[in-house]
Amino acid sequence: MLLFGQGWALPALSEDDINGKETSVTKTIEEVMVTARKREESLLDVPIAITAFGAGILSNPTISDISNLAALAPNVEFSASPPISGTSNAAAVFIRGIGQNDFLSTNDPGVGIYLDGVYIARSVGGVLKVNDIERVEILRGPQGTLFGKNTIGGAVNVISRLPSNEASATIALTGGSKDRQDLALSAEGPLAENLAGRISLLDENRDGYVERTLDGKDQGNINRSTLKGILHWQPAEHIDVRLTGDYTRQRQNGAAEVMIEIAEGRDLSTLPPGEPLTNWEAFNALIAGPRFNTQWDARWLPTGDGFNTFSTGPSQDDIDVKGLSLTGDIELSPTMTLTSVTGYRAMEGTYSRDADGSPLNYGSVVNLDEQSQFSEELRLTGTSGNHLSWTLGAFYLKEDITNHQDVVFLDGLFEATGGGADATFDVNNVVDVDSRALFGQLSWEQDAWEVTGGLRMTREQKEFFIDNFTVNSGAQLIGPEQKPTDVWREVSPGLNISYDINDRTMLYSSYSEGFKSGGYNGRLVNPPTDAQNGTPVIDTFDPENATTYELGFKQQYDWLYLQGAVFTTEYTNMQVSVLTVGANNLIAVTIDNAAKATIDGAEFEAIVTVVDNFQIRTGFGYLDARYTELGESTLLNKDDDLQKIPRWNAFVRGEYDYHLRDYGSLTTTLELSYKSKTYNDPLNVESIAQPAFTLVNGSVTWANNQDTIKASLFCNNLTDETYFLSGTTELSSVGISSATYGRRREVGLSLEYSF
């Protein structure tokens, strides 16, 4: 049979630590080591709600990137296609109801993603592939003390696989639905004394699943290559150095977004003189009718099963991501270790969407992004006597962001009005970020008790340059100007108390705080104006804050692992859209800290070895979120549901291993994940809400007894469920609600050979 746990996402199971090929051997649940508290320790000893995924499940053919792991962790939402982005490579992550749904580079995420200890500062390019990954840890709840800013929902900690000192290589070919053609190559081994290396390549190609009816293109296709290399150097017993580099090149069409709803226009002949027109009525009266003898209306909604669009506008999803990290551990003494994590990452992207879903150019957006970052973290960890363990650290991040937007709206309006109106915009944002932090944590252990306290002090500075103007008339909307530097200071404390009832059961309580960075509205085409002189102003918003109180337990036996938690979160200074007065006394939409909410929830996970060779992993999450305070000018109501929060989510995964004696082994897996109704936007628009749904994935894998040859038959979305990855509404302003579909049922065959 295969090694125990392969194909599993286990909160307390190491897939590679269990030996034996005989069916008579009862497989046990082994200890997993994690680094959630910046030091290696058993998951059972960490008083934090964590789900850890080992190499077994990460190599399962139904898992392609870290977004797929959300189905196997309670209270986690992860979309790779945020609304209005046009890309399929932007991490929109929510944990316990807190995250960020806006991809724009002027906004910060609410869940931090880390690759080998390096923080990935922007969402675009943050959907990491899982090839060559040893472990993924999902930490739920604010992680402000040790991980820092933008972890108010939690953190996703991704750890690369280190090279082996034994030479080996692997080649894998995958084919399947939508003309899927994937190639994966890897090689590793010793390069010199005390030096080992590993290199891997993943090339993915797949057709899209939303057809553009008029021009024959498809949306949602995959054309991506990822190259990764790791050097591991151990010049002495007390020194460990890892150098990692990665590069991703993506050349795709736009995401699989389609129109779901179009606002109805009125019969203009019946309107009284001077009656204001909506944007779509004006477009039809001035442009669509006179110039093209048609109308922008419901005729352009998708037909049949909905997986099609009449769009002919820009459809591009090109992204280049590169990263380099250097991590060094020096054991200064038997009780003290110094760690340095140095990282550089850069991203360039061009991604677009044809918002109107028609051959008319009512609205489209092209984003061009450039971002680079340098980070350094120094940590000193150690123990003092038999009772104290501690961590001291300093963190620095320098980030440069450039965002350019080509916004076409009501194309032809300038000509139709004789130059009197222009709604085609050139938007330019430049952001410089300087973030610094000092942090420390101290744990005191006495008999069965452990008390851990920590504190992080962060100073973040942002400079913002803006230059927005209309393209045809050249009218300056705002800028060009350099806004005076904004500085925010945040203190993030944390406290944990745990008690070991016995060596198998731990109870804990915790208090944790975190914050999401403040920033600037990066879509100022109708900026707010100064109340005194009426000039346009650059509006800023302050950091969000979250405070969580949690009670939990963990329990482990040879055949059973359990963990659960209940919690309440006070979510304050929420960054939400508000109405204000813009130029010419028109209503403008901006962002302000104008809401508070409370989120109560519960989580439970279990791993059960039912009988020899058969295991079940299951769990559920529950969230009850509600606004407790709203500013007067917000677009929200207190009765609205918070976006991206299903009240219930649950999952079950079964795996059965069957030994074929001289003919190898057969492993079957079946996975079901359920989410209750979810609103994709804060206004709770029903047309783009996701009804309750269940996804089913499965695989059958044969391997020879030497584990050098594998063949897998697999299926994602076995029941061909129709569901949304994201959705957005612009009904009141533009007359559109749209959504991005998830992929339909797809089957595949993977062949792998190792030598």
Image (spheres, rainbow, N blue to C red):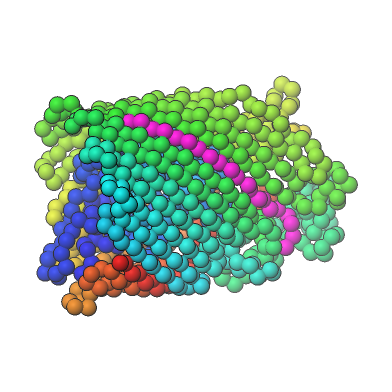
Q: Residue placed farthest to the right in the image?
A: 418
In the image, 230 versus 428, the foreground residue is 230
Residue in the picture at 50% in, 32% down: 398
Residue in the picture at 16% in, 68% down: 21
Q: Is residue 292 placed above or below 472 in the rendered structure?
A: below
Residue range corresponding to the magenta coloring: 359-379
- In which quadrant will I find the N terminus? bottom left
- Drawn side of residue 368 relative to residue 93, left or right: right
- Drawn side of residue 69 relative to residue 614, left or right: right
The location of residue 341, given as percent across then percent down, is 37, 36
Q: Residue placed farthest to the front in the image?
A: 192
Residue in the picture at 28% in, 69% down: 708
Please, what is the dominant secondary structure of the magenta stretch? strand
The location of residue 321, given as percent across then percent down, is 51, 49
The location of residue 300, given as percent across then percent down, is 68, 64
The location of residue 98, given as percent across then percent down, is 43, 42
In the image, 750 versus 329, the foreground residue is 329
Quarter residue 610 falls in:
bottom left
